[in-house]
Amino acid sequence: MRKNRLFWILLTAIVLLNVIPLGNDTSKTLSGKSFGLRLDYLIHLTAFLGFGGVYIYGMKSGRRTFENQEWLKSILIILPAAAGVELIQHLLPYRSFNPLDLLANLAGALLSALVIGLVGKRSS
């Protein structure tokens, strides 16, 4: 069985983008408003929502991230990661913690968990 490495690539990219110093100019660029909502919140939400797509891709292509209970293990990694990457920023002197970013991360992770849970339970 082929491994689904997209899960780990996405998780690594999210962690790296949340810990490397991007500078204030990047933050200002991402703060533009779209439909009355800050663009960076949408980016946070869709980054974690991407795990749902990665899971569905893995199911359709026969690529598994974990050998058994894949849906449960995926959810148990995604939800703490959503909170963890934002909380790590609180510890970094060159990044800042934003509770609304945390909520956007968690919203995307919860939507992914819902997708993964529904698809995973149907296929098992």
Image (cartoon, grey):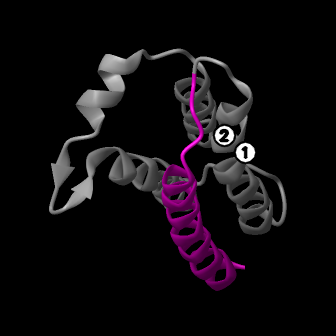
Identify the element where label 2 is drawn: helix
| Residue 29 horizontal side relative to residue 48, left or right | left
Reading the image, the residue beneath label 1 is 84
Residue 68 in view: yes
Q: x%, y% of residue 117?
A: 65, 77
The one nearer the camera, 76 or 32, is 32
Distance CA(mark 1)–CA(mark 2): 4 Å
Magenta-colored stretch includes residue 53: no
Badge 1 density bin: few <14, some 14–19, many ≥20, Cα 10 Å: some
Reading the image, the residue beneath label 2 is 85
> Which amino acid type corresponds to the residue marked 1 in the rendered image?
Gly
Q: x%, y% of residue 5?
A: 62, 36
> Which amino acid type corresponds to the residue marked 2 in the rendered image?
Val
Q: Main secondary structure of the magenta part?
A: helix
| Residue 11 horizontal side relative to residue 81, left or right | left
The reply to whether callout 1 and callout 2 are in contact (CB within 8 Å) is: yes
